[in-house]
Image (tube, rainbow, N blue to C red):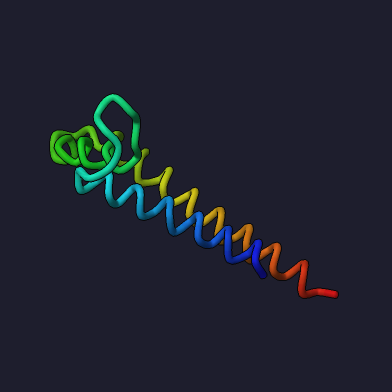
Amino acid sequence: PILVAAMLKVGYAAFGIGALGFLGLGLPPPRPDWGTMVAQGRNFLLAGNPWMAIWGSLAVAMVVVGLNLAADGINRELNRY
């Protein structure tokens, strides 16, 4: 149960870091951040080049969903016996 809870917390932390970066409260500018990438790519959405925002959003979503699925799989395997 501790391992499953830890993996869920890491997923929530990744989402929180991305949200803070989107709001401008994340890492300083020379360091890469998915939330900052989405915030900067938001300006290009209507210009016909949405890829900056899409790749950052997909990266955050895949990390959070992947960690949640891994935690669920570990939980099922540990509770099987």
Q: Nearer the viewer, residue 76 or 45?
A: 76
- 72 is higher (above) or lower (below) than 16: below
Residue, x 62% and y 62% (percent of image)?
71
- 30 is higher (above) or lower (below) than 81: above
Residue, x 34% and y 30% (percent of image)?
32
Residue, x 33% and y 28% (percent of image)?
31
Q: Quadrant of the C terminus?
A: bottom right
Q: How many marks?
A: 0
Q: Position of residue 1 (x, y in %)?
A: 67, 70
Residue, x 30% and y 43% (percent of image)?
35
Q: Position of residue 25 (x, y in %)?
A: 22, 45
- 72 is higher (above) or lower (below) than 81: above
Going by the image, does 35 lie left or right of 63? left
Q: Position of residue 74 (x, y in %)?
A: 70, 63
The residue sitting at the right extreme is 81
Q: Nearer the viewer, residue 39 or 33?
A: 33
Q: Position of residue 49 (x, y in %)?
A: 23, 32
Residue 52's quadrant in the figure? top left
Going by the image, does 75 lie left or right of 33? right
Residue 73's quadrant in the figure? bottom right
Q: Nearer the viewer, residue 6 or 64?
A: 6
